[in-house]
Structure formats: structure tokens, C-alpha cells
Image (tube, coloured by chain):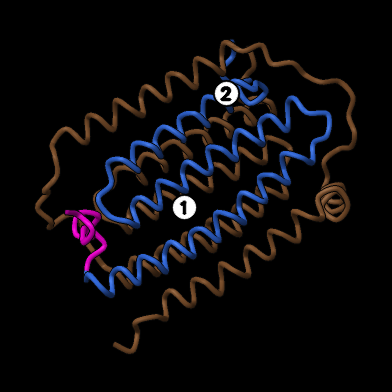
Amino acid sequence: MNILLLSNSLYTYLVIAALLFGIGIYGLVQRQTFIGMLISAELILSGASLNFMAFNCFLTPDPTVGQLFTLFIMAIAAAEAAIALSIIIAVYRNYKSIDTEDVTDLQG
Amino acid sequence: MISLFTAEGLYGLLFLGFVGLTLAGALIAASARSLIRSVAGLALCFLGVAGLYYYLNGPFVALMQILIYVGAVCVTIIFAVMLAESSELKRVTRRNVLVGPLAFLVSGLLVWGLVGLALKTEWHFSPGIANLGTVGDLGKSLLTTYSMSFELISVVLLVAVVGSLVLARSGRNK
């Protein structure tokens, strides 16, 4: 299989999306700050959007569905980022830290 | 075998470039030690994903990806990094040493499962094309078939704006 023809195959996009998702999960578990975890969550969302766009281009008879779903995911991700960042600012104001290990007031 | 110096060859080469940009950006975003570098990796990754959207017949979505993610979300995260500065460099790590390898193992298993599933499944193309998926078609279906979700998403965005303002404002006078 010619490597220059990869852009015509559905599988290429599915593999890239799976890799993005996996890298996002890795960052989400391994990161120690809230902002780092938010960045990894954005990676996971973009993996999901890439999947939607790939299925939209190759499989569905109506090519607007996947594009609209991706646009909605973008809107939700923007809202999520705004809310999460203001929560992070509020946490920073109370604890003077955005480290996940420091915010443990409810720990027994 | 396609020559590298034809239109198709350059098309494929550009695609490989976008794939590399996406994966390299994602790796930087997930593993860089300083947060600001991680945000830069995220912006790089989003640019690559926008290029992939262009290859998937979605130029409008690609432009929106650059506008919203690179232009808005990354800049907002950079503002938060500047407000709540914390460097992962100087901190002594207090967590278990197993977290890194375990995270790698879990994500590796997930990727293995997803890739296996994607490659093994016989995907069926459903015949018949309703429209071409141009910007005009997008606008039409956004205001007819999906008008309810369109209204709901604007309410969600409004609530998010007001909520983030309230959250960031509270406790400021202390």
C-alpha cells in the first residue's frame, strides 16, 4: 500500500483518532495540575471529533451530520474550558496552588 | 507507485505532514513539564487536526477549529496559566512512582483495543448522497433539522459565560 495514498482510507483517520484519545488518557492520568488535565481532556475531545468527521466523510449518506456534531462538540468544549478555568482560578485563590495533591480538604 | 512530484504526491505528503503535526503536538501537550509548553503543543495539535478536517471535506469545520480552539481555547488556557502560575519543574513529586508506567499501560491498552476494533470491523458505505455537505447545506440543516440543538447550544454557551464569570468573581473581595 502506497504511503502517499493514506488520506483516502478511513482506517488512517480511525487510527489517528485512537492515538489522540490514548495520548489524552495518558496525560489525564499522569498530569499533576488541573490545567494539564484540562489540556489532556481537550485532546480526548479532538480525538472524538476526528472520528465523527471521518465517519461523516466516508460512511454517511448525509455529509452534514458529522460536521454539525463536530461543531457542537467544539461549542461544548469551549464552554467546558471556560467553566473549568474559572473553577481552577477559584481553587487557586483558596489554596494558592493548582496541584491536584494539594486540594485534599475532604480526605479523611 | 505515485511520484512525489505530482499533485497527488504532494497532496499525500502534506497529509503526512498534518498527521505528524497532530501526533507530535499531542505528545508535547501530554508530556511537557512546563504548562506553557504543553499549551503550545496543544495549539500545534489542533492545527494538525484542522488540516485533517480539510482532507475530510470539511473546510468550514477546519476554519472553525482554528478559530475556536487555536484562537480562543488555547489563549484562555494561557491566561489561566499566567494567573495561576505553577511550575511542575521545581516541585518535589509526592505521588507513587508507578503512576507513569501505569498510565502508559492503560492508554496503550485502550489504543490497542480501539485500533484493533477499527481495523477488524467491516465498515459499510451507505449509498445515496443527500447533499454535498457545503457551508450552505450546513446552514440549512442547522436551521431546519437541528434547530432545537442549535437553540440549546446557545443556551449552554450563555450559561457557561455567566457561570464562569460568577465562579471567577466569587471570593475576590476577601
From the top left corner, tell me how far across and down residue A99 is, in percent.
23, 58
Chain for disc number 2: A
Whether marks 1 and 2 lie on the same chain: no
Q: Which residue is mark 2?
A: A12
Q: Residue at x 56, y 18 (%)?
A: B118
The label number, if any, that marks residue B43 in the structure image: 1
Q: Magenta part of the protein: which range?
A: A97-108
Chain for disc number 1: B
Asked if residue A102 lies in the magenta stretch, the reply is yes
From the top left corner, tell me how far across and down residue B39 is, in percent.
39, 55
What element does badge 1 sit on?
helix
Amino acid beneath label 1: Ala
Asked if residue B11 lies in the magenta stretch, the reply is no
Q: Residue at x 33, y 59 (%)?
A: B36
Give the quarter of the figure containing the C terminus of chain B.
bottom left
> Compared with residue A40, is residue A26 higher up or lower down, i.e. above or below?
above
